[in-house]
Amino acid sequence: MSPADDLLAFQWVDRDRGHAGYLLWASGWFAAAVVGVHGRALLQVVDLDAPRPPGPGDLDLRADGLWASVVPEEAERWTLGLEAFAVAFDDPEEAIRSGRGDLVPLGFDLEWEGPAGGVARVDGELLVGRDVIGFDEVAGCWSIGAPLPEARSGERVHWSAPIATTDDVVGLVVVGDDGPDGWRWAVAP
């Protein structure tokens, strides 16, 4: 991933229901995605002209077809809101090849509770089209200013969600096994 000292990253993986998602925001770009829902391989929102919030506590993004809000509730608790039009892809690689897909309303109403860089509990709802997908106590993580880890050689890839940022094309994947370490988001090897 392109170096971003100000990268704000929130991710989750729900192995039981077979979906995962993220919200990434850095100077100059914003991306949010969900994989494994609504019969599509990838639902993605990308804004390559997204300004970084001007100061602490001002974590709202307003753009055409996109509203995002990141609220630090306490030291280890965050609330995320998203209302956007995502592009749905049957083939995740199409996100890089053409960026063309079907427009689908996508929303997050989610809470993260846990330490930065550690395992967090994620609760809330995904809004996909007219569907509401609720979940409780799903594994997730969040960080500020830390790059996403790289996938290790030989790790099983469950989903991919490539994005083109202002600096690079980033292959984001959900990797891992069914063991105690579980699944996680990583940068493709």
Image (cartoon, rainbow, N blue to C red):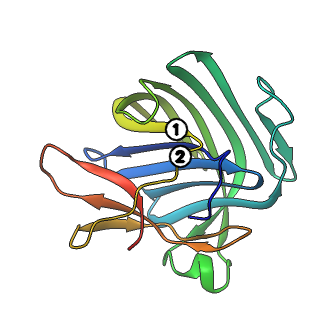
Expressed as whole percent of the image width and height from the top left, the position of residue 60 reads 79, 34
Q: Which mark is residue 124?
A: none
Q: Which residue is mark 2?
A: 146
134 vs 160: above or below: above
Helix, strand or loop at mark 2: loop
Please give left or right for residue 161 compared with residue 109 in the image. Answer: left
Q: Amino acid at mark 2?
A: Ala
Q: Which residue is mark 1?
A: 143
Res 133 seen here = no
Expressed as whole percent of the image width and height from the top left, the position of residue 59 reads 76, 32
Please give left or right for residue 59 compared with residue 135 in the image. Answer: right
Helix, strand or loop at mark 1: strand
Expressed as whole percent of the image width and height from the top left, the position of residue 111 reads 52, 26
Expressed as whole percent of the image width and height from the top left, the position of residue 167 reads 70, 71
Q: Distance of mark 2 from mark 1, alpha carbons?
A: 6 Å
Look at the numbered discs 2 and 1 and tell me whether their residues touch, using CB distance below 8 Å: yes
